[in-house]
Amino acid sequence: MAAPDQAASTPSADAPELCRLGVAELTRRYADGSLSPVEVAEVVLGRAEVVQAAHNAFTVIDHEGAMAQARAAETRWRRGAPASAIDGVPSTIKDIVWVEGHTIHYGSNSPPVNPPHDAPAVARLRAAGAVLLGLTTTPEFGWKAVTDSPYSGITTNPWNEALTPGGSSGGAAAAAAAGAGVLHLGTDGGGSIRIPASFTGIFGIKPSFGRVAAYPPSPFGTVAHVGPMARSVADAAAMLEVMAGRDPLDWTQAPGTLPGLERPAFAMAGRRIAYWSEPPRGLLDPEVQATVDEAVASMQAEGAIIEPITLPDHEQLFEMFAAHWLVGAAARLALLPPEARAGLDPGLVEAATAGAALPLLDHVRATHARVAFGRAMDALFDTFDLVVSPATAIAAFAAGHEVPPGSGLGRWTEWAGFSYPVNLSQQPACSIPCGLTSDGRPVGLQIIGPRGDDARVLAAAAAYAALD
């Protein structure tokens, strides 16, 4: 079942009250004059410093820039002319996405980038009046599903500082969980929004590919998505509304527009929901399985029709994704001058070396296999309204490690098998908290919908969150 009692013990519970308010309450109070964006920004920036000292979630906290944006938002609200439904709301950007006026380090000591302009999603947030608090940490070039890097060191989980928050949007997740900002921009090329959302007990959604424009293009190609992370479904939905849309910089977006994000009420009764519970590689932790089983049972108790499934092409998915990911790692490192490659994360170098050695025909075969898999995933939604699964096969483990110590695993892809298949198929998928392990580590439920129907995923997540 959903875990509403979890809220009382979340890491944001000890944050100042203004750090725990969501978009709707903040903007309601901005509108009636009982609260100012400047007052909120001051308090949230202070909280960001506390979270940074405890968990190393930021590479930059921009006091001057954030306060200037907050003052501008205050003026708009006083005039009764806010720029958007998120005007004056504290937000963060992952230090892998272009933000004009900031140096982007990508979690690396290699030469940084001083962007000539904002990435499309950042430009939309800025135009909407979001108060940009700073940049959040990432592993080097976002290559793995935990957050430590040669540039910024180790980021830890606000639920337990000995644990990883996951990655690669781990800094965003840690900031969100601890109340250092309301809206957080992440990226997801193999689970990098959903994994840290699961590990830190927040909500994150990987939108349908093309819903949010991306520029520059990711070296990891069309498995890479941009999306929101927040403490609630409603906040993430408000952020996605602002970021969504076409941008001429992103040629990979299909012509036309995707269906809208309006969210009609989602009733569980009569819905056919596929339950996917076997990852392509590795084992599902028994406690995670029991927690997700209970969440699925709560849907069934509301009248949903639950049917177990195995994903199409189950046995090929690991190799299919690895071919795309390894070549992407090789492509990213190929952009660096030779003298900049010293001191890179050894795991990234190993992945890039493997990608560079991958025969061209093997990559072409993986691309063709992906097409067949994507077609089969689309066809699933001719039968089912949703697919649900664990967001991750395991809960958070020791920080500073790519895999759980002593597990015998070699790479993050071996424990992240519930996330990367949905990058291959480009469907919208979210992670929403569904409970805790016996030792207090968050567990996420993944909800997957048909391509383009992000609204269905958001509505189903909101309906699940409302279950008693």
Image (cartoon, grey):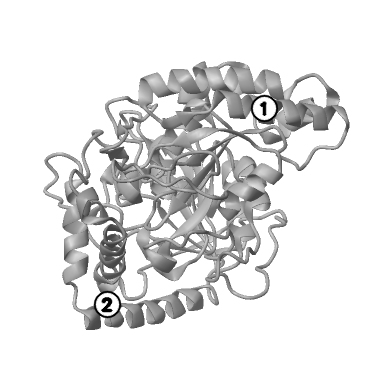
Is there CB contact under 8 Å for labels 2 and 1? no
Query: Is residue 9 visible to us here?
Result: no
Identify which residue, 301 or 346, lies in the foreground. Answer: 346
Badge 2 amino acid: His
Placement of 278 over or under 154, stated as above or below: below
Q: Secondary structure at mark 1?
A: helix
Q: Is residue 333 visible?
A: yes
Q: Position of residue 216 (x, y in %)?
A: 48, 59
Q: Which residue is mark 1?
A: 68
Tell me the quarter of the image containing the C terminus. Answer: top right
- How far apart are labels 2 and 1 at the CA level? 48 Å
How many numbered marks are there?
A: 2
Residue 212, horizontal then vertical, whole percent? 58, 58
Q: Nearer the viewer, residue 358 or 462?
A: 358
In the rendered structure, the answer to whether residue 41 lies left or right of residue 87 reads: left
N-terminal of the two: label 2 or label 1? Answer: 1
Q: Tell me which residue sits at (28%, 60%) in the image.
A: 329
Q: Which residue is mark 2?
A: 363
Q: Residue at x 26, y 36 (%)?
A: 397
Residue 394 location, x and y as percent?
29, 45
> Where on the picture, by quarter, is residue 67?
top right
Q: Nearer the viewer, residue 406 or 335?
A: 335
